[in-house]
Image (tube, rainbow, N blue to C red):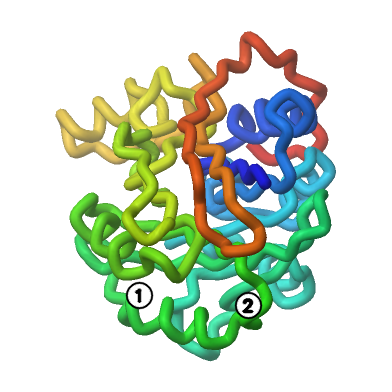
Amino acid sequence: MRILFIGDIVGRPGRDIVCAAVERLKTERELDLVIANAENAAAGSGLTPAIYRDLVRAGVDAMTLGDHVYRRKEIYSVLESEPNIVKPANLPPDSVGREWAVVTARNGVQVAVACFLGQLFMKPIDNPWHAADRVLAAIPSDVRVRIFDFHAEATSEMQLMGRYLDGRVSAVLGTHTHVPTADECILPAGTAFQCDVGMTGPFDSIIGRRIDRVMETTLTSRPTEFDVATGDVRLCGSIVTVDPTSGQATAIERLAISATDYPTPKPQSPQH
């Protein structure tokens, strides 16, 4: 089976290319499941119920989040009620949302999805290694396909998580830096790995934000609004091929497509 994991969706440009491309990609790339990190989908930070629904209508089957999980408090109701979206599992136990989810792919295979926050150069957070062990102990043993999103800053920490989970999950795919890495591989025990699958949004930017605004603040220390940029929109992610019986990955392929190749439909929600 083939699973597409889409990297951080940034603002309206990222949402628009997802809405334009995902259904076509399911056919063109023979995809059984699409998972996306949606933590930056609302104006570059957070997620709203309306945008969540737009992404589901666009063909996204499951969503992970990251350090901006609670930036929009209106998302709480979605995190409490919807079965296909997960918070980072190493947040405090009383935080809103589920630590893992199981969704059914188009071929009928059940797939477990979870995400975790890194510790290096990030806000203080519980141990992601222990959280991963806890989630794995909770996922039913007959759910063999398991896709984990590691939302982290340091590539060394991302590599450690890949090695730590090698043979226990189908894929460990990094998000958060918005910069796609060229280190995709199948680890020795059968886990697909990539430090960061990249950003889905405007690449004529500073990781999704307007260059002039970021430059002004950097050079003068004057605060500006880091608005989402609009140029050179791309959808980035990775396609992982998994043996549904063993749960082991057999291939991983980087994906990067341009919005110019996928006409954008009219926006469905008002957020930037």
Seen from the viewer's position, the closer of residues 27 and 259 is 27
Residue 76, picture quadrant: bottom right
Residue that protrudes farthest toward the front in the picture: 245
Residue underneath mark 1: 128
- Whether residue 178 sits left or right of residue 97 in the image: it is left
Residue 242: x %, y % from top left: 58, 51
Residue lying farthest to the top in this orientation: 260
- At which x and y percent is residue 194? 37, 45
Quadrant of the image containing the C terminus: top right
Give SS at disc 2: loop
The residue shown at (19%, 33%) is 218
Q: Are marks 1 and 2 in contact (CB under 8 Å)?
A: no
What crowding class fits label 1: few (fewer than 14 Cα within 10 Å), some (14-19), or many (20 or more)? Answer: many
Q: Is residue 264 above or below residue 12?
A: above
On the image, the x and y values in percent for residue 97 come to 63, 76
Pointer 1 or 2: first along the chain: 2
Residue at 23 percent across and 50 percent down: it is 155
Q: CA distance from mark 1 to mark 2?
A: 15 Å
